[in-house]
Amino acid sequence: MRPKTTVTAALVATLTLAGCGGSAGDANEVVYWDTSGSAESAVFGEIARECGRTGGYRVRVETVAFDQALNNYKTAAQGGQGPDVLRADVGWVAQLAQAGLVQDLSGTPLATDTADYLPNTLESTRFEGKTYAVPQVTDALALFYNKRALRDAGVAPPQSWDELKAIAPKLGGENALFLNNDEYYALPFIYTHGGDLVNPDARMITVNSPETVRGVQVAKDLLDAKAARTSLDQPNSYTSMKTAFTTGETAMVIDGPWAVSEFTSSPEFADPANLGIAPVPGSATPSPVGGHDYVIRQGSDATEASRKFVSCMSSTANQAEVAAELGLLPTRKSAYGDPAVAANPIVTAFRPLAASTHSRAWIPQNAELLEPLQTAYGDVLSGRKPAQAALDELAQTYQSTILTDYAKR
């Protein structure tokens, strides 16, 4: 999972062209939609083209804005167009599988040779007992902190939210922590207190359960106690958080490994040793499973080449190269043994967090659950609505528009 981004005119043009793209009947060319950020796309693109050169097929890499990719892929694939391979968010796979827009990989080596993958990364690749994707990278949220600021204040990274409240006055009160009020960043608070959005096994909406309400309320309590701050401008909350942290205004933030390159490009963290990484305060598994998977479009004329391509891209060697160069987290256990990966302090810090992430509901509506959560979470943090009222309304929204066959608790 990544924060939402603004789509530039150039990317819109790319999307328009890519939406009509595809292998055009060429079984020897793989069209690959790369949805990574600009700092990552050059690395992924070069690895992709090298896979083609060594594998005996061509690869055409098309860069697509992450926040537009799902809708553009669905539109293109429904018309028999689009890429042969898509870098999909883990939350998209079940939806694309249910819609018949990605290939069932069950029985192929891509789905049967999986012992090397971290177990929690495989959950997102499956839908109704079949495999539709291959893990690319995994994500976890962590507490990033300014080592210099905490050292000068004489405090250690908090292990609980109560500890944060206790040390906040030494870190400038509300500038101790900047809370991004985007929906994904609400999940650690919810999971820490035993809550969740839904229970798919019971077909029950649980977003307004006492546990979930308590988790969201804890986040609001941090603001009320002047132990944290947030942005009332929700569309720009992530940007505001990043700015506050990289200028030294805020001592701590919660974010993922994708943010490291932006942090370390700032004067505050020009010395990467000043960037600390610790678990998100709370339970042992507060972070949601994140990351991306490779999927192959149903109806692709380059199916054989696409399978070779996905196998190459997800190999231990290429996962290790991505981890070493970008600090992203491999999904293969063997990649962590590569000397260059083991020497990467970001990957080393995140590895135990990625191995203990909290499972999500891998249902077709997964992605749809998050957008209305953003509104509810923002309403609570801003004080516009009490936590129980906001989440009761969210439960009603889930039942009336997203999960009509689920019961409310």
Image (spheres, rainbow, N blue to C red):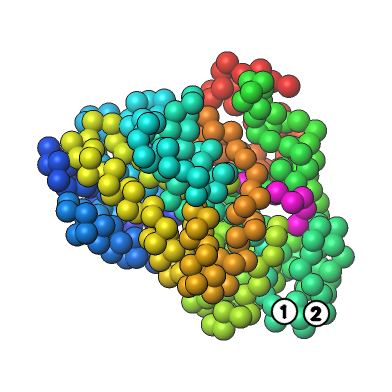
Residue 327 in view of the camera = no
Q: In which quarter of the image is residue 187?
A: top right
Q: Residue at point 50% right, 48% down?
A: 117
The answer to whether 19 appears left or right of 129 in the picture is left
Q: What stretch is highlighted in magenta?
A: 281-288
Kind of residue sitting beneath label 2: Ala
User: Residue 63 at what x, y percent from top left?
Assistant: 29, 55
Q: What element carries label 1?
A: helix
Task: From the viewer's side, name the closer residue of 278 and 153.
Answer: 278
Q: Residue at point 75% right, 57% down?
A: 281
Residue 113 in view of the camera = yes
Q: In this view, does 130 lie above or below 45?
A: above
User: Residue 140 at what x, y percent from top left?
Assistant: 59, 54
Label 1, label 2: how many angstroms apart (C-alpha)?
6 Å
Q: Residue 265 carries which label?
A: none
Question: What is the crowding at mark 1: few (fewer than 14 residues within 10 Å), some, or many (at least 20)?
Answer: some
Q: Is residue 54 above or below residue 90?
A: below
Residue at which label 1 appears? 149
Q: What element carries label 2?
A: helix
Magenta highlight: main SS: loop
User: Residue 149 at what x, y percent from top left?
Assistant: 72, 79
Q: Which mark is residue 153?
A: 2
Kind of residue sitting beneath label 1: Ala
Task: From the viewer's side, name the closer residue of 106 and 199.
Answer: 106
Whether pointer 1 and pointer 2 mark residues with C-beta atoms closer than 8 Å, the reply is yes
The answer to whether 51 appears left or right of 245 in the picture is left
